[in-house]
Image: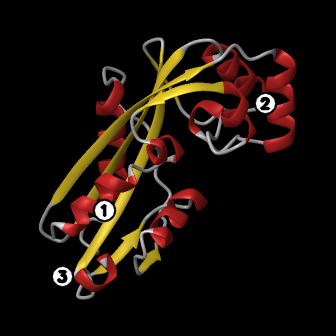
Amino acid sequence: MLREKLKNYKIILASGSPRRQQFFRDLDLDFEIRIKEVDEVYPPNLTEEDITDYLAVLKSDAFEGELKENEILVTSDTIVWHRNQALGKPKDYDDAFKMLQSLSNSTHKVITSVCFKTKEKTQVINETTAVTFHPITDQEIDYYLATYSPFDKAGSYGIQEWIGYVGVAKIEGSYPNVMGMPTDKVYHFLNQL
């Protein structure tokens, strides 16, 4: 459906995330992947969706002046916001362990921003989902980290993995957003073009 509507556009997904690439396939989009290394640093005064909005735009700015008339570049960024701080991807095992310990028996926000850039303009949408974890033991955290190696994920976990099945008590908002992309908002945005 969307594929037909966007047949005159070329969609470029600037993401190495296998989950985001799968979302685009599942939305039945024709797209190509173009990735540029970007130093993901944001001003320290930013909080919550201001961080992800900033980083999604920063990633799109790397393509400034390169887009052709019919191209739509899509970039995105996801963070876990917990106890007034952003949890990105863990630096190592110990960092991941500490993150999961802090998420245990509490509620955090998963925030994703998606930037759509054309030759003419840049637009950003974002989504916030509240995720509540049951208490998680150190043994469960150790098992999860050793078995699933979630070191490429914001907050050190993937809700679609074992930890999501046993650790998540409830979510309020978009489930795909917790995996890295609010697919419903992306679909409706592209559908309006």
In the rendering, at what x and y percent does residue 10 appear? 31, 81
Quarter of the figure with residue 129: top left
Q: Residue furthest left?
A: 120
Left or right of residue 44, residue 26 in this image: right
At label 3, the amino acid type is: Glu
Label 3 vs 1, first from the N-terminus: 3
Considering only vertical position in the picture, is 1 above or below 56? below
Identified at 31% across, 79% down, the residue is: 1
Q: Secondary structure at mark 1?
A: helix
Determine which of the numbered discs, if any, sits on residue 30 in the image: none
In the rendering, at what x and y percent does residue 114 appear? 33, 51
Closer-to-camera residue (80/42): 80
At label 2, the amino acid type is: Tyr
In the rendering, at what x and y percent does residue 105 appear? 63, 12
Q: Secondary structure at mark 3?
A: loop
Left or right of residue 48, residue 98 in this image: right
Q: Could you tell me how far apart the alpha carbons at marks 1 and 2 are, in whole angstroms?
A: 35 Å
In the rendering, at what x and y percent does residue 107 appear? 51, 17
Identified at 65% across, 17% down, the residue is: 134
Q: Residues within 10 Å of mark 2 (few under 14, many from 20)?
A: some
Q: How many marks?
A: 3
Identified at 56% across, 36% down, the residue is: 154
Mark nearer the viewer, 3 or 1: 1
At label 1, the amino acid type is: Tyr
Please name the residue that numbered disc 3 is placed on: 69
Determine which of the numbered discs, if any, sits on residue 187 in the image: 1
Label 1 vs 2, first from the N-terminus: 2
Please name the residue that numbered disc 2 is placed on: 93
Q: Does the CB distance between marks 2 and 3 fall below 8 Å?
A: no
